[in-house]
Image (cartoon, helix red, strand yellow):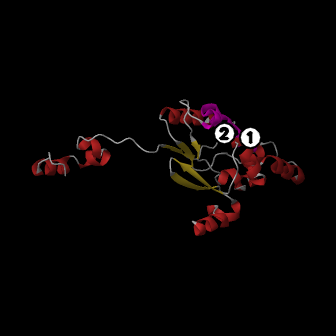
Amino acid sequence: MSADISRRTFLKFTSAGFVTLAADPFAAFGAARPAPKLKIGLTSNIHISKWRGADRKFEECLRFFDRAKVDGVLVAGDIADSGMLFELENTAKIWFKVFKDGKRSDGEPVANLMHYGDHCTGGYLTEREGFLKRYGLVGKPKEEIEAFKKKHLLIHHRERDWEACFREKYSQVKVVTVKGYDFILQHFDPRGGRTGCTKEMEEFLKET
């Protein structure tokens, strides 16, 4: 307890102003708020698709993070709405439009903490009629449908496409260090079942 707060004042404060303390403990005691050592912009399930306004909203989100001077941006999965390469390409295009060469508008670096979700590389959406309708595949021969999937779906070339889009080496489990803090991220992989957790994560944790 601060020396300049009496017992009566403190008890009165705790009975009437606990919510204020929980919301802002520094302001409650008249103390200066310390500058954060690390700022991370967090969003999830952006579902980039050319048929929606998600790309515009994602850009607005990144520009907000840029103004906030974040040190990294975490998109917790489901980047590509239907797991298509062009959706990942659009995501990367927006990323580098806002963070040119991986830097904020003030020239400071911003870490890419994005990773694949089940919509990106799960592949389960491709068996639904909506997917076939979306890409004009209804009624097409099975061989033609499979050839289309093989060419355009991230699930078939997740490593190559990630590296091409984001200009960084792909790793199933990636560790990104931002200002001395380690972020351990895992791309969703259907080999890991519903959770997408593969043996790479198990091995990483054993070695850590």
| Residue 120 on the magenta span | no
- According to the picture, the residue beneath numbered tag 1 turns out to be 86
Task: For the residues labelled 2 and 1, say whether their Cβ atoms are less than 8 Å apart.
Answer: no
Mark 2 or 1 closer to N-term? 1
Label drawn at residue 43: none
Please give the name of the residue rendered at 61% of the width and 50% of the height, measured from the top-left corner: 77
Other residues around mark 1 within 10 Å, as few (<14) / some (14–19) / many (≥20): some
Quadrant of the snapshot with the C terminus:
bottom right
**As drawn, 145 above or below 190:** above
Give the residues drawn in magenta, as a range: 85-102
* Disc 2 target residue: 91
The spot of residue 109 in percent (x, y) is 57, 38
Would you identify the image quadrant in which residue 36 lies? top left
Identify which amino acid the numbered label 1 is placed on.
Phe
Element class at badge 2: helix
- The outermost residue toward the top is 105
Amino acid on which the number 2 mark rests in the picture: Thr
Q: How many marks?
A: 2
Q: Do we see residue 198 in this rendering? A: no
User: Which percent across, then down, holds residue 18?
Assistant: 24, 49
